[in-house]
Image (spheres, rainbow, N blue to C red):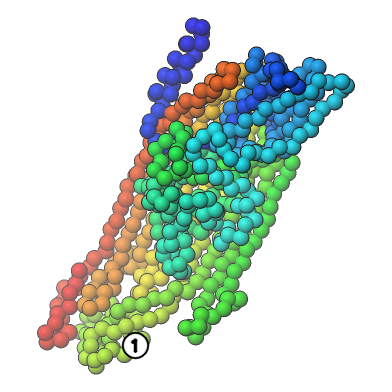
């Protein structure tokens, strides 16, 4: 008894040291059940084997005096459960798919053996979850990769669950395409959710939760589709494992290797050549989109060491409508020579002003926007022993966006950098099961206007050159999480904590502003303003 209390005290102390009121996410499943004979009597000592059909990792448990068995922190995947006892037939339940946050209640009744025989049973998970109040929705890798979603964007699938919508926001090519970081869960604001990959922080913004960088330069959100094993969405009455969230938690679980070599290769091309022309336009706006990638996974050492790697690249070029107010031809004709070089940077009017002496006019045209992205994931899994498992993952993303401005010489370039490292270790004991996660998520966004480098003057006189800005934001997240499960009879107690450090780094916004020393008169009553 003293030994038991000592172990509880040590583990409780560890939780106290690392526990902080931030979010976590269930990344695994659990299985529990009872083994009985034909008359319903418990079979003590029955052997229960849980075999991962992809990696051959096997876990073994013995039913206690009440015929009860438990498996905690089981990685998602497809399993075979074999239940046997002396004098009884062997029960085999095959192709059992487990998803994140699932708590499977599995009872087995063994028949008395008259000869060497076994019973093979195929089962499916229950359609209604009765063990918890939270609403958990899972989208598996088949749906992620085969459902028709625009630009292989997994975030579109979030709307398959009740109470989840993506707000429509402005993007580089259209004002009616969902983009950016927004997802509304249960009608709450889009900034109220948490985003994790393999259970640890995966936001793309150091200031708030987001699956895209600021102003949406990404084509690929967080990680590429080929690397996703499943997308889990927990909302409603949030469990303790998802503490700290306001509306819900979105968790992506990455794919791992297996004993069988598997992979994929694909390319997706979209061109405006095949689009219908808008009835109000004289020509089709140009659009060219190309997305390509592949993945490979397999074994390094049979049943022991596995690898998985995937990469996705994307390129998109499109015309963007540009409208604005520009100096009229009359103003250009009377402007002093000192302003000639600046006015030459501004597009010429495309409409005739209402007055011959008007100083401003309207411009309407189009310019090309270019966007590219690259996202890679590498993961290593090791079955160190039947009681110890380790998974390591690295994710790299490099979005790039070139946006045109009213002044052709003042285009805007946005470059993002994300690097995520994640480690996941599981130790399995006879009664104690522990899951430890550690991660580091590093972020950098650099947005600069071309005019900033050339010291573009900011001129305002009924029209504006717009000025130029340098925007730089960086930050990182460090996460350490510990989850512990203790099983005794029909009861399992889970507790844990998470320590997370958010470093918002620095946000630098600099607006370039230059002025001419000459104050020249454009008209007898009006003077130009400079800023």
Q: Is residue 516 left or right of residue 274?
A: left
Which residue in the structure is indicated by mark 1? 351
The mark total stands at 1
Q: SS of the residue at dot 1?
A: loop
Quarter of the picture containing the C terminus is bottom left
Q: Quadrant of residue 17?
A: top left
- Measured as percent of width and height from the top left, residue 349 is found at 33, 85
Question: Would you call the spot at circle 1 few (<14 residues within 10 Å), some (14-19), or many (20 or more)?
Answer: few
- Measured as percent of width and height from the top left, residue 81 is found at 71, 30
- Measured as percent of width and height from the top left, residue 171 is found at 44, 64
Report the residue that reaches farthest toward the bottom: 356
Q: Nearer the viewer, residue 496 or 360?
A: 496
Q: Is there any visible trace of residue 398 in the rendered image?
A: no
Residue at the spot 32% in from the left edge and 59% down from the top edge: 470
**Residue 449 to residue 343: above or below:** above
Q: Quadrant of residue 79?
A: top right
**Residue 416 to residue 86: above or below:** below
Q: Is residue 263 left or right of residue 185?
A: right
Residue at the spot 85% in from the left edge and 26% down from the top edge: 117
Residue at the spot 49% in from the left edge and 45% down from the top edge: 250
- Measured as percent of width and height from the top left, residue 9 is found at 44, 15
Q: Nearer the viewer, residue 436 or 175?
A: 175
């Amino acid at each position: 008894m003293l030994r038991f209390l000592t172990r509880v005290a040590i583990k409780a102390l560890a939780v106290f040291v690392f526990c902080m009121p931030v979010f976590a996410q269930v990344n695994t499943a659990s299985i529990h059940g009872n083994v009985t004979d034909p008359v319903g009597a418990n079979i003590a000592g029955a052997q229960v084997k849980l075999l991962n059909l992809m990696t051959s990792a096997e876990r073994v448990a013995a039913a206690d005096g009440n015929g009860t068995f438990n498996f905690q922190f089981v990685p998602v995947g497809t399993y075979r459960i074999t239940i046997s006892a002396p004098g009884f037939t062997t029960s085999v339940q095959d192709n059992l798919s487990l998803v994140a946050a699932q708590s499977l209640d599995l009872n087995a009744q063994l028949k008395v053996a008259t000869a060497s025989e076994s019973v093979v049973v195929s089962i499916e998970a229950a359609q209604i979850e009765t063990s918890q109040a939270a609403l958990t929705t899972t989208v598996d890798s088949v749906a992620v990769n085969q459902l028709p979603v625009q630009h292989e964007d997994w975030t579109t699938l979030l709307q398959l669950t009740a109470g989840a919508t993506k707000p429509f926001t402005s993007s580089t090519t259209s004002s009616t395409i969902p983009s950016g970081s927004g997802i509304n869960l249960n009608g709450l604001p889009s900034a109220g959710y948490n985003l994790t990959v393999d259970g640890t922080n995966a936001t793309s913004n150091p200031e708030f939760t987001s699956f895209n960088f600021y102003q949406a330069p990404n084509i690929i959100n967080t990680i590429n589709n080929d690397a996703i094993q499943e997308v889990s969405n927990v909302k409603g009455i949030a469990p303790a494992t998802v503490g700290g969230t306001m509306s819900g938690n979105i968790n992506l679980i990455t794919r791992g290797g297996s004993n069988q070599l598997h992979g994929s290769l694909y390319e997706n091309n979209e061109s405006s050549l095949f689009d219908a022309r808008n009835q109000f336009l004289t020509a089709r706006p140009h659009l060219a989109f190309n997305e390509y990638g592949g993945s490979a996974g397999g074994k390094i050492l049979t049943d022991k060491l596995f690898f998985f790697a995937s990469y996705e690249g994307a390129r998109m070029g499109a015309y963007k409508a540009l409208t604005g107010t520009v100096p009229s031809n009359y103003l250009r004709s009377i402007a002093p020579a000192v302003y000639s070089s600046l006015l030459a940077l501004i597009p010429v009017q495309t409409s005739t002003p209402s007055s011959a002496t008007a100083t401003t006019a309207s411009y309407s045209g189009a310019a090309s926007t270019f966007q590219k992205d690259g996202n890679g994931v590498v993961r290593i899994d090791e079955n160190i022993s039947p009681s110890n498992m380790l998974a390591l993952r690295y994710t790299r993303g490099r979005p790039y966006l070139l946006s045109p401005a009213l002044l052709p010489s003042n285009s805007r370039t946005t470059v993002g950098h994300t690097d995520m490292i994640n480690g996941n270790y599981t130790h399995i004991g006879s009664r104690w099961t522990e899951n430890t996660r550690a991660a580091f998520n590093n972020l950098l966004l650099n947005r600069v206007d071309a005019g900033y480098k050339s010291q573009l003057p900011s001129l305002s006189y009924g029209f504006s050159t717009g000025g130029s800005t340098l925007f730089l934001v960086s930050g990182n997240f460090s996460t350490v999480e510990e989850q512990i499960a203790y099983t005794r009879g029909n009861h399992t107690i889970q507790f844990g904590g998470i320590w997370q450090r958010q470093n918002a780094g620095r946000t630098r916004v600099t607006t370039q502003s230059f002025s001419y020393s000459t104050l020249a008169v454009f008209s007898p009553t009006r003077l130009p303003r400079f800023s």
